[in-house]
């Protein structure tokens, strides 16, 4: 009886499509973050065995900045203190971060509950830091990052906890299972015809 009740409560296909599109938009965003950090990691590796102080001085000069002013001076000094080992460590951390983002994006794209939980938890971890940064020095970029992150967390919480979200996920997984079964049947039909 309970099984019959579960199947009688259907979610309109439009809602299923909207929820899937929303979660996949978050997945795309996470994959994009992973790709950007991956590129940054390769950029860091390209700086190994290079004279970073000279490179920083040329960059400051090319930008027509006063090398004696505060930020250009700090930039050049930081470049002078950066070792190849530190660059490799930062690149390794960038690669690890990008792998985490890619795994999360894959799971979200496939509408997996573990990926939704992972995205919710990782998003919530950043919220206090983003709030602190915003209170330290409010900028539009910091406010925008906080708002986008909070909206993503709120949306994924909605998908995770709402009845509509659960029913939509079930419908999506049933559709995927139906597609797999159909593909398997066609494959068996072809091999049976031989």
Image (spheres, rainbow, N blue to C red):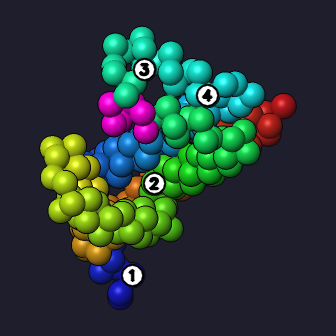
Q: Which mark is residue 138?
A: none
* Camera-nearest residue between 20 and 174: 20
Residue 8, visible in the rendered structure: no
Q: Residues within 10 Å of mark 3 (few under 14, many from 20)?
A: some
Quadrant including the N terminus: bottom left
Q: Main secondary structure of the magenta part?
A: helix
Mark earlier in primary sequence (3, 2) = 3
Q: Which mark is residue 60?
A: 3
Residue sitting at x 33%, y 77% = 6
Give the distance between the C-alpha atoms of the residues marked 1 and 2, in whole angstroms. Answer: 27 Å
Position of 194 with respect to 23 (left or right) is right
Give the percent coordinates (x, y) of residue 40.
54, 34
Q: Secondary structure at mark 4?
A: helix
Q: Relative to 28, say whether 51 is above or below.
A: above
Residue sitting at x 59%, y 21% = 54
Residue sitting at x 73%, y 45% = 85
Closer to us: mark 4 or mark 1? Answer: 4
Mark earlier in primary sequence (4, 3) = 4
Give the magenta range.
69-74
Residue 125, visible in the rendered structure: yes
Q: Secondary structure at mark 2?
A: helix
Give the distance between the C-alpha atoms of the residues marked 4 and 3, in whole angstroms. Answer: 12 Å
Pointer 1 residue:
3
Pointer 4 residue:
52
Q: Secondary structure at mark 3?
A: helix
**Do residues under tags 4 and 1 come within 8 Å of each other at their CB atoms?**
no
Pointer 2 residue:
108
Mark earlier in primary sequence (3, 1) = 1
Residue most extreme to the bottom: 1
């Amino acid at each position: 009886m309970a099984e019959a009740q579960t199947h009688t409560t259907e979610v309109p296909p439009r809602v299923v499509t909207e929820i899937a599109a929303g979660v996949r938009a978050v997945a795309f965003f996470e994959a994009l973050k992973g790709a950007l950090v991956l590129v940054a990691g390769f950029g860091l590796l390209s700086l190994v065995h290079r004279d970073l102080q000279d490179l920083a001085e040329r960059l400051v000069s090319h930008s027509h900045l006063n090398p004696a002013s505060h930020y250009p001076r700090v930039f050049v000094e930081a470049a002078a203190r950066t070792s190849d080992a530190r660059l490799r460590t930062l690149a390794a951390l960038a690669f690890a971060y990008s792998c985490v983002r890619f795994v999360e994006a894959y799971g979200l794209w496939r509408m997996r509950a573990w990926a939704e939980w992972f995205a919710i938890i990782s998003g919530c971890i950043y919220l206090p830091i983003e709030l602190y940064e915003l209170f330290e020095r409010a900028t539009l970029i910091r406010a925008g990052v906080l708002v986008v992150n909070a909206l993503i967390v709120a949306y994924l919480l909605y998908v995770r906890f709402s009845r509509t979200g659960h029913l939509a996920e079930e419908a999506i997984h049933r559709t995927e299972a139906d597609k797999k079964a159909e593909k398997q049947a066609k494959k068996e039909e072809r091999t049976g015809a031989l």
